[in-house]
Image (tube, rainbow, N blue to C red):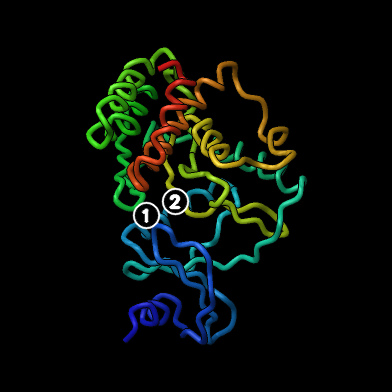
Amino acid sequence: MDTVRQAVREALHDDIARRLPLHGGDLSEVMLFELAGGGPVVAKRGAMVGREARMLEAIAAAGVPAPKVLGLWGDVLFIEALEEVRPGPDLWARFGEDLARLHATRGGGYGWPEDYAFGPVAIPNATAEDWPGFWAERRLLPFLPHLPAALARRVDGLARRLPELLPAQPVPGLLHGDLWTGNLLTTARAIYLIDPACYHGDGEVDLAMLHLFGGPGPGFEEGYGALAPGWKTRRAVYSLFPALVHVRLFGAGYHAMAERFLTAAGS
């Protein structure tokens, strides 16, 4: 029997009427089904879907829009299908408020109970006592063995300077963790967070990722609120992490991006 069809029967007590096209699925297999019992459902298949389910539930528990988890069976996760529209200024303002609410949801420390991964790139989430230590040990230094020597020296140098650049004990807010604009899904009612990579840390991490490729629309900044002085340097530090992820996933074409953020951070 088709494994996904079996998962539908076991987790949702339904059957697949037809398979529909769906974009996405860079790091996991994503499918859209119409169920025999009526209505569409999104199925994601991959090694990390159980962890993703727990992250989606944590976001929803914070009062922030996220697709509802409908079921989990083995390596197949089922979530509600949402109808996507183009966002207007009112939705961007509300999204700013929602993201501020997410970041105000405090954790017990910096990190997450489970590690994660972006494809072959491991994302360690073990807790750390202070935030600069977490960012150095969990987000920058693991890349050093995979970088050219000159770039690795610059990243290592920045990691040593983090106590000068980052707050020691910011609010350990709940982060989406991979908040580029492709991981936002806009409905008529709200902008939903999808494909999370959650952990607890400085909310400015999500803002850096949100501005890495493009950025949010008008109204977002007013909805989210003002940032503390020095945010431009912190944004460069935080943007370096996804740049290094892209170096690992896609190669030397992203060296220039990483070098640009290192320069902006003074390293």
| Percent coordinates x, y for residue 159 in the rendering | 33, 21
Label 2 Cα crowd, 10 Å radius (few <14 / some 14-19 / many 20+): many
> Toward the viewer: 128 or 160?
160
- The structure residue drawn at horizontal position 45% and vertical position 33%, both measured from the top left corner, is 257
Quadrant for residue 152, please give it.
top left
Q: Quadrant of the C terminus?
A: top left
Label 1 Cα crowd, 10 Å radius (few <14 / some 14-19 / many 20+): some
Q: Is residue 84 above or below residue 62?
A: below
User: What secondary structure is found at the residue carrying circle 1?
Assistant: helix
| Percent coordinates x, y for residue 243 in the rendering | 42, 37
| Percent coordinates x, y for residue 20 in the rendering | 54, 78
167 horizontally vs 186: left or right: left
- The structure residue drawn at horizontal position 68% and vertical position 59%, both measured from the top left corner, is 187
Quadrant for residue 256, please give it.
top left
Q: Which residue is mark 2?
A: 55
> For the view shown, which residue lies furthest in the top direction?
164
Q: Is residue 52 above or below residue 163?
A: below
- The structure residue drawn at horizontal position 51% and vertical position 38%, both measured from the top left corner, is 209
| Percent coordinates x, y for residue 178 in the rendering | 47, 44
82 horizontally vs 125: left or right: right
Q: Which residue is mark 1?
A: 51
* Label disc, if present, on residue 225 of the rendered structure: none
- The structure residue drawn at horizontal position 59% and vertical position 78%, both measured from the top left corner, is 39
Tags 1 and 2 touching, CB below 8 Å: yes
Name the amino acid, label 1: Arg
